[in-house]
Image: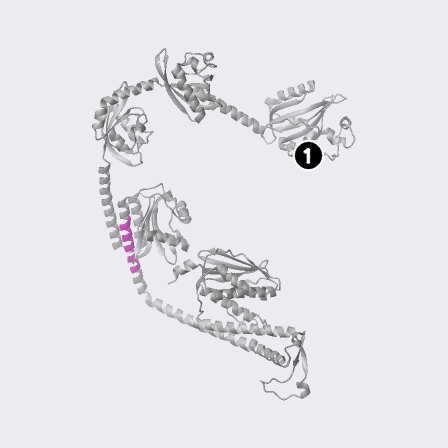
């Protein structure tokens, strides 16, 4: 960390024209901050430390003209508290560092040299910190000392240094524990350094370091070593070389391992391998003696050390049986090769050999290289190989025999389970008990982690109704799903494969939803068999392995298939019983049903009467007024020219009698008189005529819907294309009402099943409702999303809201306020909107928010799901 020295006091007071010693001698702190002090405070605030100025007078008293805000971060003390009593800082110094601090201050004062000190402090909160202080003392004219400098937090650096020292000590201890020779050698063969503690070496360190390979080793060994050094440095890969050297003990074999340890230098680890070489020669001789016996035996024969189990020799039968090559086995222990399925079997074998010296026909399981488990009869004896106790073992493979025996037992258990299930089905009508007992016994039989039965219901989706699971794993009992796309995928898994066999789910392709389901319930392998009723998929009998991947045996698959057939029989039997129970209560149900039908008919009659009342009310009130107004307008327009007067603000209307309506003759002067009519009046009358025409059409359409049903032509439609045609219809209406429409509908939405013409009317009517009930300047936002196989469309405006009662009744057919000239027409349109959306298989509604206006919404089925469900 760089040392920082700041001269603060002169900067602080120069702008006032005062000398430092004059300020200090005044005996009080300055009560002003010159213009440069804020800059210094900014610098100090961005430093991980504290800037200070301390004045030490000749009488020993201390005055602190300035101390930065870093004091609070470093010492957990306010600057004012330190300025009031400088000793509070000294009290925080660690007891073991006080003497060094005092001595450093004394040396700095006596020599007037820069002060530098590192030590520890203990903050008021108990934190231990390392700090570094630097200062430049200045001797004043009156003999006082002015100290100005910086104190930094160096705790992180000190902790890093301590960890580095601990690491170095640890690595040194490791190196000291290695008995091998270690050399640092340059590219040209010069010995740079060595580590010889614990190794048998005749030369001293001084006789080796600085010498070349050619000076200490035989020429052939030096040449081999030089080549190995070059290859290590050029490739950066560990190199190994073996050689022999004459010693006082005779010719010794050595092995050198070389790795790159620096620029143009290697680290050579040299080990005496004479004993290993001699042992290898002895073992080779032994192998020759027993080679014929090994090669002629059809059983696997091995020779391994008694204590470690390290293989000395194996025959060809062992190679074929284990799957390992001879070079992979020799010199390795059985534990290194992971041969023992149960480690205790090796311990039991050694204990028996040590006590009796022989073992006969022990049934042992071994693991082949491929991971498969085999069973052998092991016979072994202890033999002596040059003073080394070893095991001569003969392995007779009985795997096939054990498999046949296990299969026979499995078949017997399967037949017993099927027979018991069949008896249980015939003797019991409790379906729930039958299914629960079935999954429990199947899981016990298969030794699986989970077995359950799921049923497929067209209305409710897929649901788990019976389960047996190991308590260590999550339960799927009661699990259900109604996501149509996901349901279809699950159905297809069993539809395409009569039996679904998955030994490892990580090795198959599946959708994200299926993978998420496997992760949620920790499924690693699965076996699923469909339950078929009347050639339709009714459910599935499923076994899961959660502990890991599993190979499902053919006999296990056959068991689940037969059990699924029995479950189907039980379900069918339960359904028959349920139908019998329903027939017993059918008479009462029919009475209730007839009563409900009569009530429904009465409601339909009341509904028809309500529609009739609406029609009569509308015709009696609205149509009569509209017709009279139209007659007046047509009469006046008949007597006026279609030329220049039509463009004036007022039109003169003649009061001559109507030709089509008999009336009493009027005086000539009165018949020829005319009155001016405002254009706005005529425009309002035209608007009223349009509303009445729309209302009449809506009434006719409602009447037709109630009697014959709403006729729609549903076909796949691109939603964005449908909106394009709607916008062209809305544009004049939006311009007239000074409204805006923001389209947030994505262009890549899937197709919907819809009648485009009627759906455009729905959108126009919903927007028209907001325009009629709000002043000009309304803003609309149109959006759409895909949710659960449906497209949900929202039209949001920023106008006035409605009460909850009004929202709930907006799409109902009811008589509205006759004083509102628009309410009847708009109400009929809202009613028709709901009719259209319901006919499409969707829903419609409105939400009110006083701050954001109204939000109309409706849903439409996607083309895929809708087309699939249509007959």
Is residue 169 in sight in this rendering? yes
**Is residue 817 placed above or below 561 in the rendered structure?**
below
x and y percent of residue 821 in the render? 58, 72
Horizontally, residue 230 falls left or right of residue 33, namely left
Horizontally, residue 62 falls left or right of residue 385, namely right
x and y percent of residue 67 in the render? 69, 30
Residue drawn at 55 percent across, 69 percent down: 826
The image quarter in which residue 326 lies: top left
Secondary structure mostly seen in magenta is helix
Residue drawn at 30 percent across, 21 percent down: 280
Residue drawn at 26 percent across, 52 percent down: 424
**Is residue 525 placed above or below 68 in the rendered structure?**
below
Which is nearer the eye, 808 or 338? 338
Which is nearer the eye, 695 or 13? 695
Residue assigned mark 1: 41
- Quick check: is 572 in the magenta stretch? yes
**Is residue 442 placed above or below 589 in the rendered structure?**
above
Query: What is the span of residues highlighted in magenta in the rendered image?
Result: 560-576
The image quarter in which residue 741 lies: bottom right
- Quick check: is 8 in the magenta stretch? no
x and y percent of residue 370 in the render? 31, 36
Residue lying farthest to the top in this orientation? 248
């Amino acid at each position: 960390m760089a040392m920082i020295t700041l001269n603060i006091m002169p900067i602080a007071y120069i702008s006032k024209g005062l000398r430092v010693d004059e300020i200090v001698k005044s005996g009080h702190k300055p009560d002003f901050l010159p213009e440069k002090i804020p800059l210094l405070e900014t610098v100090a605030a961005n430093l991980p430390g504290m800037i200070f100025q301390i004045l030490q007078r000749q009488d020993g008293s201390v005055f602190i003209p300035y101390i930065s805000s870093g004091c609070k971060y470093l010492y957990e003390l306010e600057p004012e508290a330190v300025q009031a009593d400088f000793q509070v800082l000294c009290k925080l110094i660690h007891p073991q560092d006080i003497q060094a601090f005092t001595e450093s201050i004394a040396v700095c004062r006596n020599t007037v040299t820069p002060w530098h000190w590192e030590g520890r402090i203990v903050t008021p909160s108990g934190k231990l910190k390392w700090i570094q202080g630097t200062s430049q003392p200045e001797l004043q004219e009156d003999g006082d000392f002015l100290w100005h400098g910086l104190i930094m937090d160096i705790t992180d650096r000190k902790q890093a240094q301590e960890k580095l020292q601990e690491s170095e000590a640890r690595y040194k201890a490791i190196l000291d524990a290695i008995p091998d020779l270690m050399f640092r050698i340059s590219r040209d063969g010069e010995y740079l350094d060595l580590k010889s503690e614990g190794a048998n070496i005749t030369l001293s360190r001084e006789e080796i370091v600085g010498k070349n390979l050619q000076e200490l080793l035989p020429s052939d060994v030096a040449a081999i070593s030089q080549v190995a050094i070059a290859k290590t440095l050029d490739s950066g890969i560990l190199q190994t070389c073996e050689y022999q050297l004459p010693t006082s003990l005779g010719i010794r074999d050595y092995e050198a391992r070389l790795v790159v340890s620096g620029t143009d230098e290697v680290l050579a680890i040299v080990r005496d391998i004479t004993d290993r070489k001699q042992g290898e020669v002895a073992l080779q001789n032994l192998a020759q003696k027993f080679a014929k016996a090994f090669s002629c035996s059809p059983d696997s024969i091995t020779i391994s050390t008694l204590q470690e189990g390290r293989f000395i020799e194996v025959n060809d039968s062992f190679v074929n049986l284990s799957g390992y090559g001879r070079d992979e086995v020799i010199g390795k222990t059985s534990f290194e090769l992971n041969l023992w399925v149960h480690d205790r079997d090796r311990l039991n074998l050694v204990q028996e050999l040590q006590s009796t010296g022989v073992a006969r026909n022990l049934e042992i399981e071994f693991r082949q290289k491929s991971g498969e488990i085999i069973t052998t009869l092991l016979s072994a004896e202890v033999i002596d190989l040059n003073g080394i106790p070893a095991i001569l073992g003969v392995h007779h493979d009985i795997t096939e025999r054990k498999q046949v025996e296990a299969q026979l037992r499995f078949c017997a258990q399967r037949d017993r389970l099927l027979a018991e299930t069949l008896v249980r089905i015939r003797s019991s009508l409790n379906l729930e008990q039958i299914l629960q007992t079935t999954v429990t016994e199947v899981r016990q039989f298969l030794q699986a982690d989970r077995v359950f039965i799921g049923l497929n219901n067209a209305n409710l989706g897929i649901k788990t109704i019976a389960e047996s699971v190991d308590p260590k794993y999550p339960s799927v009992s009661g699990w259900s799903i109604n996501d149509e796309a996901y349901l279809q995928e699950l159905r297809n898994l069993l539809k395409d494969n009569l039996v679904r066999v998955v030994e490892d789910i990580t090795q198959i392709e599946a959708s994200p939803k299926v993978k998420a389901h496997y992760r949620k319930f920790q499924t690693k392998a699965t076996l699923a068999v469909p339950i078929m009723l009347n050639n339709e998929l009714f459910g599935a009998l499923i076994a899961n392995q959660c502990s890991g991947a599993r190979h499902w045996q053919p006999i296990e698959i056959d068991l689940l298939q037969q059990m699924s057939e029995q479950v189907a029989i039980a379900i069918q039997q339960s359904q028959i019983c349920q139908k019998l129970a329903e027939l017993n209560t059918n008479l009462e149900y029919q009475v209730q049903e007839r009563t409900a039908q009569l009530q429904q008919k009465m409601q339909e009659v009341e509904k028809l009467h309500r529609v009739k009342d609406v029609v009569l009310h509308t015709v009696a009130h609205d149509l009569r007024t509209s017709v009279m107004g139209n007659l007046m307008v047509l009469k006046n327009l008949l007597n006026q020219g279609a030329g220049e007067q039509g463009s004036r603000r007022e039109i003169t209307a003649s009061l001559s009698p109507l030709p089509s309506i008999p009336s009493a003759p009027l005086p000539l002067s009165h018949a020829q008189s005319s009155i001016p009519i405002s254009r706005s009046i005529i425009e309002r009358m035209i608007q009223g005529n349009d509303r009445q025409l729309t209302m009449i059409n809506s009434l006719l359409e409602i009447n037709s819907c109630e009697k014959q049903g709403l006729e729609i032509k549903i076909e796949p439609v691109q939603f964005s294309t449908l909106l394009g045609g709607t916008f062209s219809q809305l544009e004049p209406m939006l311009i007239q009402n000074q409204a805006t429409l923001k389209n947030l509908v994505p262009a890549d939405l899937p197709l919907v099943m819809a009648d485009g013409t009627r759906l455009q009317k729905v959108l126009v009517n919903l927007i028209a409702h907001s325009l009629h009930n709000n002043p000009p300047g309304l803003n609309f936002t149109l959006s759409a999303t895909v949710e659960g196989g449906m497209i949900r469309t929202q039209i949001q405006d920023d106008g006035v809201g409605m009460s909850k009662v009004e929202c709930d009744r907006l799409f109902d057919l009811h008589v509205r306020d006759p004083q509102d000239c628009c309410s009847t027409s708009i109400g009929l349109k809202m009613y028709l909107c709901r009719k259209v959306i319901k006919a499409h298989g969707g829903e419609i509604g409105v939400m009110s928010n006083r701050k954001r206006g109204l939000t109309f919404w409706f849903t439409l089925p996607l083309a895929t799901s809708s087309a699939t469900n249509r007959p």
